[in-house]
Image: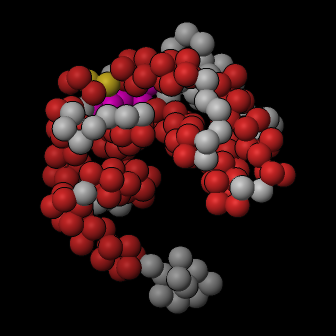
Amino acid sequence: GSLHESSGSMYSHGLAAITLAEAYAMTRDKDLFAAAQRSIDFISEAQDPVGGGWRYNPKQAGDTSVVGWQIMALKSAHMSYLTINPNTIKLAEKFLDSVSTESGAYYGYTHAGKGSATTAIGLLCRMYMGWKHTNPALERGVQFISKTGPSKNMYYNYYATQIMRHYGGDEWEKWNEVMRDKMVNSQAKAGVDKGS
């Protein structure tokens, strides 16, 4: 079930597992089922058994960035009715707790902190793992992202946009208006990069 690169990147495994799980969900192609399920099983096998996160290599102590891709793959698997080991989610919660501050409103990279990109990743993971819109920490985190707004950091924008879309309401409307225009205006207008 491993799809991580031989150089040891669980980033590629998370992205590939998302693709397999979503392809299976959209097609119900039985030929995809086994590969999708194995990729999800590998996420559980590769998890740090002590701290609950993921990093570049299987069983390595985690970082929030790699954790985000694995949680998104697990969410896609859940929506595809693939089997997820419940201990995997419990351990992931343990990791997120270890890098969070203010009861989960903010997140660091490998230690507790308050980075904008890591906070966006941590909050999206929490939403995917069941936090409700009324969770006080989620509300504070959404307000932090809303005040920060879209930035030049596209990694942050990727996660923050998903949070704001899922959260909805005025926060989403405000975010989307700025983000939409920022994306269109940043698009290359000429040359080989035109449209990117």
Q: Residue at x 36, y 40 (%)?
A: 127
Magenta segment's dominant SS is loop
Q: Residue at x 27, y 51 (%)?
A: 167
Horizontal side of 27 relative to 52 (left or right) equals right
Front position in the image: 80 or 96: 80
- The image shows residue 119, relative to residue 91, as above or below, that is below
Q: Which residues are magenta?
A: 106-111
Q: Residue at x 61, y 30 (%)?
A: 84
Image location of residue 99, percent across then percent down: 37, 23
**Count of numbered circles in the view:** 0
Q: Residue at x 36, y 20 (%)?
A: 97
Horizontal side of 82 relative to 98 (left or right) equals right
Image location of residue 100, percent across then percent down: 32, 25
Quadrant (top left/top right/bottom left/bottom right) for the N terminus: top right
Front position in the image: 115 or 47: 47
Front position in the image: 123 or 89: 89
Residue 36 seen in render: yes
Image location of residue 18, percent across then percent down: 62, 48
- The image shows residue 71, relative to residue 100, as above or below, that is below
Image location of residue 136, percent across then percent down: 17, 32
Horizontal side of 20 relative to 178 (left or right) equals right
Determine if the magenta segment contains residue 3. Answer: no
Q: Quadrant of residue 34?
A: top right
Residue 9 seen in render: no
- The image shows residue 133, relative to residue 23, as above or below, that is above
* Extreme-top residue of the structure: 50
* Extreme-bottom residue of the structure: 190
Color encoding of the figure = secondary structure
- The image shows residue 189, relative to residue 96, as above or below, that is below
